[in-house]
Amino acid sequence: MSGSGGADIAELLAAARGGSPRAAGRLLSLVESPRRDEVLDALGPATARVVGVTGPPGAGKSTTVGAMTAEYRARGLRVAVLAVDPSSPYSGGALLGDRIRMAEHVHDRDVLIRSVASRGHLGGLAAAVPAAIRLLAALNYDVIVLETVGVGQSEIEIASVADPTVVILNPGGGDTIQAAKAGLLEVADLLVVNKADREGAAQTVRDLRTEAKVPILQLVASEGTGVTELIDAIDAHQRADTPERRSARARGQILSLAHTLLRTHPALDGLADAVADGSSDPYAAAEQLILGIGTGAVSRRPVS
């Protein structure tokens, strides 16, 4: 599309709202670029349901997301899927391998599938995700499914964006132990034992009941078994949402993004040097960083 600025974005929004997946994709690229604020300023208020799906690698997250998408479409809802992947160390792009499992939805104009590179953002989620969610809500998607890679403690940040957070596990002790160590059980609103037709599924459910006080569901995502019950449980959780929970999620997003901004603050290196050589202390340096002081000279407070 020729031209630039607000007119470009207005045209893209009009095309995307008219059902153009290409325009929607272009807008999502813009919210990952320095033009993010231009896009956000062009959007009106909008909300959508955001469902987070995470869990250890191999648990069947992508298969589950595909089955969930099919169920939501059967209920007449428009669905957007954001798959947050580790950044490629070479291209900075997202890894797209799991997208193959969503192939049945590729030609459905009411399903949008997008991989977003995390690009090193702490917390496992890409910095562009909150903006992408707001954009997709404004494009009239009813449900946004956010799938994260599911490794390490960083994945707990999904709870600041999604409600509910669905943690997918496999039968057997390995996934349960790994999820507990990663802190996933603490942020799970719903626990799902996938591949529940395998040996050990019932024992895994019993083990989880001793570790967590949230609903535990069983699923065979590859066959669609248990998907209706999962969507019903998600809907029930969303109906119970409160202003307090929404505010808590918003605080989490703000703090996470603020942390990312502070990591690239121009004063950080100078403040770090001052702490390292003993001429200041980390408490004073932290206060200066938060207040935006020190982009030039660094104020040095002797360590008492």
Image: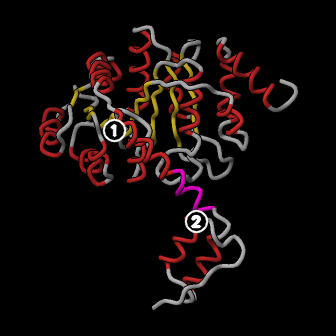
Q: Is residue 96 above or below residue 74?
A: below
Classify 10 Å Cα crowding around label 2: few (below 14), some (14-19), many (20 and above).
few
- 283 vs 229, nearest the viewer: 283
The secondary structure that most of the magenta stretch takes on is helix
- Labelled disc at residue 244: 1
* Span of residues in magenta: 257-264
Look at the numbered disc 2 and give the secondary structure of its residue.
helix
- Identify the image quadrant of residue 169: top left
Q: Which residue is mark 2?
A: 291
Was residue 301 drawn as part of the magenta stretch in this picture?
Answer: no
Position in image of residue 51 (x %, y %):
40, 30
Number of marks in the rendered image? 2
- Earlier sequence position, callout 2 versus callout 1: 1
Percent position of residue 142, x then y: 48, 18
Image point (42%, 52%), residue name:
154
Relative image position of residue 163 (x, y in whole percent) = 37, 33
Q: Quadrant of the N terminus?
A: top right
Q: Amino acid at mark 1?
A: Glu
Point out residue 173 in the picture as x, y percentages from the top left corner. Answer: 21, 46
- Secondary structure of the residue carrying tag 1 is helix
In the rendered image, residue 261 lying in the magenta stretch gets the answer: yes
Residue in front for this viewpoint, 301 or 60: 301
Horizontal relation, residue 7 to residue 168: left or right: right
